[in-house]
Image (cartoon, grey):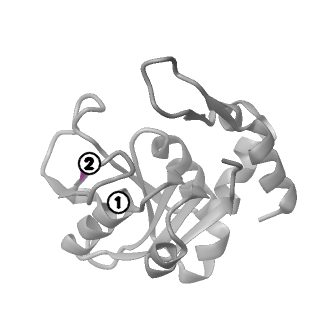
């Protein structure tokens, strides 16, 4: 991944104050999606650290993962499998495999599901997301992969905030770090 892309990701990022009823700032990554050069570079940059492991599929959680996942899958020439959350709209038809994450940065446990027909033995999975704060969702996705007989190879994210030992244990790679 180029230093130029990392610099551009930081330039296009903003912290936003959502108002007086909140206790923290919210990340605004919409600049990443609006800039065509950044958008074109994200897929190849996300897959680069895992290309030699030969992933057969990319998995990404709703919502922003539904944008990054296909970019990464296209860069690898493999398929994409979305991981759904119950509150994100209509769930797909058919049998789903579910896992619940450990508590995330807000103390929530997130339920994630993957359609069983799209992941199975022999699949080598690259998980992709925009931001990994605690790796809670990563852990849930790895659990689903393992339950379905697939092998999670690691995770590539634009930003990784989780403690370095957690990132190392789960094979999480970041494209950049952002100022606090």
Question: Which of the two discs, 1 and 2, labels the residue nearer the N terminus?
Answer: 2
Horizontal and vertical percent for residue 95? 12, 51
Residue 62 quadrant = top left
Report the residue marked by disc 2: 110
How packed mark 2 is, by other alpha carbons closer than 10 Å (few <14, some 14-19, many 20 or more), is some
Horizontal and vertical percent for residue 118? 29, 58
Report the residue marked by disc 1: 136
Q: In this view, does 131 lie to the left or right of 85?
A: right
How packed mark 1 is, by other alpha carbons closer than 10 Å (few <14, some 14-19, many 20 or more), is some
Write the residue at 55% across / 64% down.
Answer: 156
Tell whether label 2 touches label 1 (CB within 8 Å).
yes
In front of the other: 19 or 147 = 19
Determine the CA span between mark 1 and mark 2. Answer: 8 Å
Q: Quadrant of the N terminus?
A: bottom right
Q: What stretch is highlighted in magenta?
A: 108-113
Horizontal and vertical percent for residue 61? 39, 49
Residue 121 quadrant = bottom left
Q: What element carries label 1?
A: helix
Determine the residue located farthest toward the top in the rendered image.
Answer: 20
Write the residue at 27% across / 42% down.
Answer: 85
């Amino acid at each position: 991944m180029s230093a130029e892309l990392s610099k551009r990701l930081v330039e296009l990022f903003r912290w936003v104050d959502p108002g007086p009823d909140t206790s923290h700032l919210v990340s605004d990554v919409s600049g990443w999606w609006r800039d065509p050069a950044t958008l074109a570079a994200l897929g190849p940059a996300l897959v680069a650290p895992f290309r030699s492991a030969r992933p057969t599929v990319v998995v990404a959680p709703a919502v922003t993962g539904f944008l990054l996942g296909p970019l990464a899958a296209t860069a690898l020439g493999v398929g994409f499998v979305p991981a759904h959350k119950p509150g994100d709209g209509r769930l797909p038809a058919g049998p789903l495999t579910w896992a619940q994450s450990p508590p995330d940065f807000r103390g929530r446990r997130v339920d994630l599901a993957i359609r069983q027909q799209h992941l199975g033995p022999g699949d080598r999975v690259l998980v992709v997301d925009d931001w990994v704060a605690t790796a809670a969702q990563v852990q849930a996705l790895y659990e689903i992969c393992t339950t379905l007989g697939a092998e999670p190879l690691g995770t590539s994210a634009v930003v990784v905030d989780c403690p370095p030992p957690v990132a190392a244990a789960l094979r999480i790679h970041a494209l950049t770090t952002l100022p606090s």
